[in-house]
Amino acid sequence: MADHAQEEPPGSGPAEGGRTPAAEGQPDPAPAVPERSRAAVPSPVPPSRKPARRRREPVKIAFGPVENGLDYLISVTKHLKGDPAPRDLKYAILHLAAAAEVLLKARLQGEHWSLVFEKPETATRESFDNADFKSCGSIEALDRLQRLAQLDVGKKGSTKDDLQRLIKWRNALQHYGITTYTEGKESKTLYAPAVEKLAANLLQFLLTFVRDELWQSKPPGSLQHLRLHEEMREVSRGLSDIRMYLTVRWSGLRAELEPLKDSTVQCPTCREFALLCNGTPECRFCGMTEETGERVADEYVDLVQEYISLSDPRRVIHPCPECAEFSLVADVEFASERRASHFCFTCGEESEPQNPGSCDVCGILTAVKDGLSVCPDCFDARLARF
C-alpha cells in the first residue's frame, strides 16, 4: 500500500513567500536581510574631530634706542595736532621728554657705552648689557655730547633752557601732577601756548639732531638706514598739523626761502612749499631728504597732483635730459605760483621730455629709453620673474 503524505491542515504550512506565521499574540519577526544587502549597509561614521587650533605666538615688544625715540616723537605730533586738549598736552610733555632723553643717550652711547652711566667710572659691561644701572639725565647727556664728543648741538637759541623747563614739567606730571611750576623764585601757571611753543622749539632741534647725528651714521641702503628714514618721514608728516610748529618754523624760514620762491616746490611729505631740488631733494620745513628725486617725483604725482587716470599724460614721469634720473614731472607749481611745463625733482632743471611714447605691455604713457618702451611698473614686474 503506497504511503501517502500526511495532509497538513490549512494555515499550518509555510506562508506564501516562505514566511512562517508568528505565534498568536507575538510580533512578526524582522524580515531577513540578504547577505548582499547586509554588506551594503554603511557602518556608522565616528564624529569628526575639529582640527587643533594653531597657537598664536605672543607679540614681541622690541624697540631699539633710536626707533624708540622716534616712536615717542610720532606720538608727540599726534597729541599736538589741531587744537590739543589738556590731556593731549600732558602726553605731549611726557613723550617729548622721553624722546629727548632716549635720543641724546643713543648718540652718547655711540661715543662709548659707559658714558650713559650716571657715574661712568663705576660702569661695567655686564650692568650695561642687562640694563641694570642708573643712567645720566637729559641735561647731563647734552653736556657730555658737547664736552666729550665735541658736538656743536644744543648751543644755539634756547634749546638747553627749553629742555630744562620740559624736564620740570615732566617731573611734576610724573610724580604728583601739575597745577603750577616753579621757575627761579616764581610760581607760574602752565598754559597751553607755552607747551606748544616749547614743543615746537624742541621738535626742530630733535629732528635736526636725528638727521645729522643718528641717521647719517647708518650705512646708506642698510635696513637700519631705510627704517629710520621711514620713521623720520612719519614724524615729518605730522608737523604741518601742529599750528604752533607752523608758526615757529616759518618765522625762521620765510626770509631764507623768499629769494627762492621761483624754484621751491611743494613737499609731498609735509605739503609745505619748502622743497628744494639741487642734486639732493631736501625740504627746509620738515627736513625730508632723498638721495635722488625718483621717489619724490612718484609721491608728488600721487599725493600732491593726485592724478588718478593712468592715461593722463601729466602722470608720466620721464627721464631727465640733464641728469638722466626718472624724476621729470609735468605741470609743477612753485611757491611763486608759477607753473613749469616739466620739472626735475633731482637736479631742479626745467626740461622737455625726450622720446615720449606708450608702454608696449600695458599701453599707458611712458618714455622711450634705449629703444625700450616699457613703463617702470611693467619693467619691475618682468625683472621680478628672474
Image (cartoon, rainbow, N blue to C red):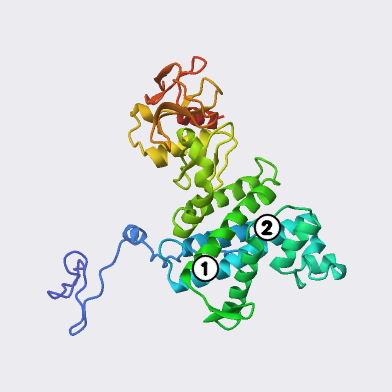
Residue at 25% x, 75% y: name it. Answer: 29
Q: Is residue 108 left or right of residue 277?
A: right
Residue at the spot x=51%, y=20% of the render? 321
Query: Is residue 75 something one can see in this rendering?
Result: no
Q: Is 40 situated left or right of 122 in this image?
A: left
Residue 67 lies, with reference to residue 44, above or below; the image says above
Disc 1 residue type (three-letter): Val
State the residue position of label 2: 154
Amino acid at the residue labelled 2: Gly
Distance of label 1 from label 2 (alpha carbons): 19 Å
Q: Is residue 173 above or below residue 89?
A: below
Task: Decide: is 142 above or below 222.
Answer: below
Badge 1 is on which residue? 195
Residue at point 64%, 46% (across, down): 225
Query: Which residue lies at the image location 37% right of the left edge and 26% below the top edge?
Result: 364
Q: Is residue 73 above or below residue 332?
A: below
Q: Secondary structure at mark 2?
A: loop
If you read the primary sequence from the N terminus, does the residue marked by circle 1 or circle 2 appear first? 2
Mark 1 Cα shell of 10 Å, populated few (<14), some (14-19), many (≥20) = some
Query: What number is the disc on residue 213?
Result: none
Considering every residue shown, the one lying at the far top of the view is 371
Q: Position of residue 258 (x, y in %)?
A: 49, 40
